[in-house]
Image: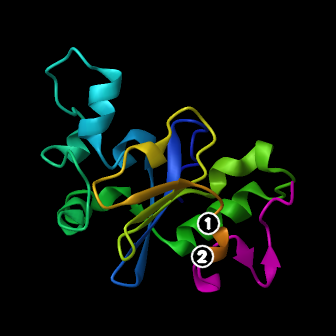
Amino acid sequence: MIKNPLYGDDIIVLIRYDNEYFWYLSEKTIWVMNYTKWMEIFYPFSNKKATIPEREGLDILNRDNWLEFKERNVELATNREELRRLIEFNLPITSWDEKGELFPALFLDFDKNILYSLFPESLAFERYVPEYWTGLYEDFYSLIPDAEKYWIIEGVDHFPKE
């Protein structure tokens, strides 16, 4: 079974690329799409580049290099079944505050060039998107096809109501 995400450090990410969906569970900063912009803001007097090995040479994650990123980071990928087992292991889920990290924090839609974020902490992913992308901090769960909603198990929706 996959590990429980550590609140504030790890996130679950949904990717749509060519109308296919892919799930990831990993450390959060890997998913800052525009490292160049992020580094300019947080390290304005530094010459250092992004130092996360998973993003080496991919300072700006976009449709042109998504497949390279995907191939290089297979170990970060997960799937609906693993995520479903994670939900089952953590039942009952009574509130978002208690178990919100078990649900997607980001949805990167490479088909529409939109990043949706519900990440509740200070890293504002929606501010660091590539050129020609839109970054939004808003609920995206209604955009996820029911077949991808791993938290619906045997017809029961385990998404926290509060």
| Circles 2 and 1 in contact, beta carbons < 8 Å | yes
- What kind of residue is marked 2? Leu
Q: Nearer the viewer, residue 62 or 21?
A: 62
Residue 91 x %, y %: 80, 59
Residue at the spot 22% in from the left edge and 46% down from the top edge = 55
Tell me: 161 left or right of 53: right
For label 2, the SS is helix
Q: Main secondary structure of the magenta part?
A: loop
Tell me: 99 left or right of 9: right
Residue 134 x %, y %: 42, 59
Q: Which residue is mark 1?
A: 140
For label 1, the SS is loop
Q: Residues within 10 Å of mark 2 (few under 14, many from 20)?
A: few
| Colour mapping used in the image | rainbow
**The stretch drawn in magenta includes residue 35:** no
Q: Residues within 10 Å of mark 1 (few under 14, many from 20)?
A: some
**The stretch drawn in magenta includes residue 153:** yes
Tell me: 36 left or right of 113: left
User: Magenta part of the protein: which range?
Assistant: 144-162
Q: Nearer the viewer, residue 116 or 31?
A: 116
Report the number of discs: 2
Residue at the spot 21% in from the left edge and 32% down from the top edge = 51
> Is the residue 22 above or below the residue 46 in the image?
below
Residue at the spot 52% in from the left edge and 49% down from the top edge = 11
How far apart are the two marked residues, 2 and 1, measured between alpha carbons? Answer: 5 Å
Which dot marks residue 143?
2
